[in-house]
Image (spheres, rainbow, N blue to C red):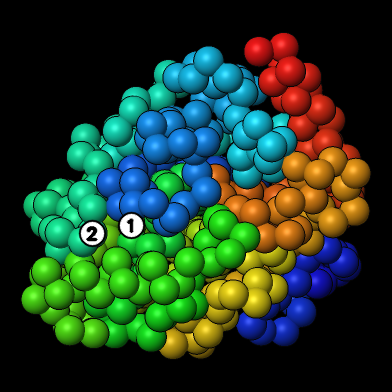
Amino acid sequence: MKYDGVDYPDLRSVNQDQTCNIPVSTINPLFALAISYTYTSLIPGITAAGQNKDLIKYTSPADAEFLNYGHCKCLDSVPVTPEGMPTPAIITKTALDLSKMPFLIINAGSVVKPQVPYISFDMNSGNDIRTGNAVDETHVRMALSHGESLGRELAKLSKMVVIGESIPGGTTTALGVLVALGIDAWSKVSSSLTKNPHTLKNRVVEEGMAKAGIPFGGFKNDPIKAIAAVGDPMIPVVAGLACGISGSGSNVMLAGGTQMTAIVAVISAMNRALENICIGTTCYVADDPYSDIQGIANEICSDIPIYAVDLHFEESERLGLRAFANGFVKDGAGAGGVSILAMLKSSGSLTGTSILRSIEIEYDNLTRKQKKK
């Protein structure tokens, strides 16, 4: 992909031409990570997050702490599974460090409070969407309003704000919001698991919609009710942020996979402009044969740009890192989007391969710590 006359071989446009349309003046990015929680994540087989059911609630705060300190405080361990598979925050942290990109943490309903400085939206965690009552409607409205207010302030700090998320089970709640809004996303959302449990996700969403008494597309013109019925607290927070930032004339990169299409769908359903908004992800999401980020996005707005980065994990000698290329997690904690902006900010000095080498150093440090435990 070309940008400002420079060729970036490890970046590409997924659904448009090979020219990046992010204005040159924006390459002084700011990253915001929204951490959240939904009890939907406790449904067996829904997510790869956490080593067991009791640890899932620590996933998001652990990501936030890792970005700040390089280790966790809420857990007496480092963010690598016993099998050697790391949190995607290892990608995010490496790209942030290499690019010296500033970042902040937003607590959007995490059940465990991270031991880092953060901005709080005073949100409760999301309920299991099978109840048909996922998020209190008044909290959805508050999150959108507060998110827009904060977004306007962030727009004063940077012309390009990258927004990531960390919420276990978030692709299932994203599916719920998409189909409630009339977007045919059945069996199209991604998964942190190597085997995407589409049948389970579809059934969970169907149960939630039935409980809420809504058919497919039943809340097409009411995104607040769609989120309240079958969504999660992260979605209105990030949608509000994006509206506030883009409405103030700055650009937004939604850093994530198919979950970010739900954000785009909510913004579109609110009749808000999408012209300053794009999605940034990894090639592992963009090329995933078991999901369809481009197909979902095209149903919402065919003009929404989607960019993908190749970090060459398949070339790593570390099995835990190579797992990303084999379908484990694929993206998360803003990994893809932050890597994209780190490359653009570097004017080509950072590549997928050079970022991978730095990730390997960080990974080796983590695995050494793991062995000492």
Which residue appears at 65% of the width and 72% of the height? 288
In the picture, residue 330 is in which quadrant?
Answer: bottom right
Do the residues under discs 2 and 1 have CB atoms within 8 angstroms? no
In the shown orientation, is residue 217 left or right of residue 283?
left
In the picture, residue 256 is in which quadrant?
Answer: bottom right
Residue identified by numbered label 1 = 235
Which residue appears at 71% of the width and 36% of the height? 84
* Residue extending furthest toward the front: 44
Which residue appears at 81% of the width and 28% of the height? 364
Mark 2 Cα-neighbour bin, 10 Å: few <14, some 14–19, many ≥20? many
Which residue appears at 84% of the width and 56% of the height? 314
Percent across and percent down for residue 171 are 43, 61
Is residue 318 something that shows in the picture?
Answer: yes
Q: Amino acid at mark 2?
A: Ile
Is residue 346 something that shows in the picture?
Answer: no
Eyeballing the image, is 75 above or below 93?
A: above
Nearest the viewer among 10 and 356 is 356
Eyeballing the image, is 251 above or below 20?
A: above
Q: Is label 2 or label 1 in front?
A: 2
Percent across and percent down for residue 182 are 29, 85
In the shown orientation, is residue 343 left or right of residue 130?
right
Eyeballing the image, is 245 above or below 183?
A: above
Q: Secondary structure at mark 2?
A: helix
| Quadrant location of the C terminus in the rendered image | top right
Residue identified by numbered label 2 = 129
